[in-house]
Amino acid sequence: MDKFLIRGGVPLRGKVEISGAKNSALPCLAATLLTAETVTLHNVPYVKDLITQRRLLEDLGATVLTPELRTHKVNAANVDIFEAPYELVKTMRASVLALGPLLARFGRAKVSLPGGCAIGTRPIDLHLKAFEQLGAHVSLESGDVVATAPQGRLKGAVIDFEKVTVTGTENVMMAASLAEGRTVVKNAAREPEIEDLADLLNKMGARIRGAGTSELEIDGVEALNGAEHTIIADRIETGTFIVAAAITDGELEIRGCRPDHLVAVINKLSEAGVEIEEINPTTLRVRRSRTGLRAVNVTTEPHPDFPTDMQAQFMALMTQAAGESEIVETIFENRFMHASELIRMGADIAISGHTAVVHGPTKLMGAKILASDLRASASLVLVALCAEGETLIDRVYHIDRGYETIVRKLSSLGADITRITGSSAEAEAA
Ligand code: EPZ
């Protein structure tokens, strides 16, 4: 298992290019199953989860060509397998995104019921209930979800999600695109990744209105065509680098980002004493303000409010902010795993249920620590960059799932970071 060795104390300076959004590329790749024609996706991030998603498509019988590292040309004309096996799903829950497309195009799908993960039980009951409302028959058979469309084609329905679910909304959007008649989705997720998927589906000939709002209208069509699409920038990687500039007291120019996708994060970090200047619509200049970092409170909520995927990174920053910060996690039941590692480095954090209270600033000392999930590992890297001495982070395969060439990007900004590898899980892409 790879480890990162980081020597803290170096203010990061320079320019960093943001990669494509993992959480948009995953549903967009799944959407290629909806047509027999070729779909070309640009700006697909070179991260572990997308390598897994590509393998899933190939296991189903699709062909995936990558004329360039971050361009995927997918053709699913010859898909003749309609199931995602446990071995794959257990490594990546987002495999459930194959359910909607397979059910919609082939009238059948079998996907291993994803287990929980470090941050929570992560059920998909809302996905399955929505498929049943679209006319599918859904059963659980020895750990697999087995879904069929008895009439061969799904039928539009009114889906009112009792909870906002990102991949649930995406699965329904894809399934309803080929259903007979109109589907209305209420309490839909509003994340930018939902809009990006809708953009791709509409380029393929789908008829989706309202993406980005909490109500979608989808008029099903007989078939979808090929298309070409560029994946949006990763807003969570962007937020992570904003924190990296602030926590190391450096100055970064963050390029190829979409500030309009992380307004709540930018507002909250500005309140905390981070100077964030928009140079142009895709470039930010970031540094700590003269007055230093101030503790502020945050509660995670569905988009457009503060994203749960930035909670761990924000907690890392609050360890260096003056005062008391209350962080409330409302989306997942166990998303404070990073706190115990930050405490081992000297942070003053008290956890009570869904609330963490951080007192700062505290001087952090390097230590041997353990990554537990994708965003937690990002927060460990952030504190290691500002801690005194050496930090050795184990199980960094978590970070390789969602951050493209993170060692190369941080090293280019002056960070003293090396990957101690068995076999490098991260391709230091050209
Ligand atoms: C997506 O996960 C993201 N993953 C997550 O990012 C992100 O943290 C999450 O949305 C919330 O923004 C991808 O897009 C691939 P949800 P998802 O369904 O869709 C409950 C990362 O770090 N729920 O919006 O699985 C669920 O337990 C990952 O990149 C049900 O109860 O999240 C959770 O409490 C981590 N039943 C809440 O809803 C369901 O059927 C939100 O989950 C579905 C969800």
Image (cartoon, rainbow, N blue to C red):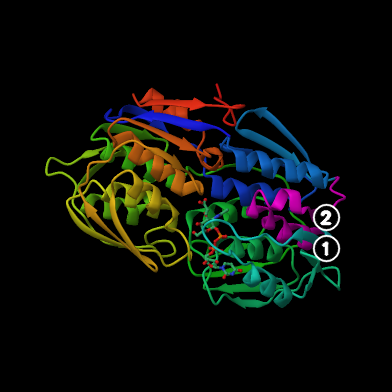
**Which residue appears farthest toward the top when viewing the image?**
430
Query: Which image quarter holds the N terminus?
Result: top right
Q: Is residue 391 above or below residue 170?
A: above
Provide residue 119's location: percent of width, then percent of height: 51, 58
Q: Which residues are magenta?
A: 78-105
Task: Please name the amino acid that badge 1 sits on.
Answer: Arg
Provide residue 422's location: percent of width, then percent of height: 60, 27
In the image shown, does 62 or 332 lie closer to the viewer? 332
Residue at mark 2: C-beta within 8 A of ligand 1? no
Q: Is residue 82 magenta?
A: yes
**Does the rendering let one see residue 15?**
yes
Mark 2 = which residue?
82
Q: Is residue 126 above or below residue 116?
A: below
Q: Residues within 10 Å of mark 2 (few under 14, many from 20)?
A: many
2 or 1: tag closer to the N-terminus: 2
Q: Are marks 2 and 1 in contact (CB under 8 Å)?
A: yes
**Magenta-colored segment: predominant secondary structure:** helix
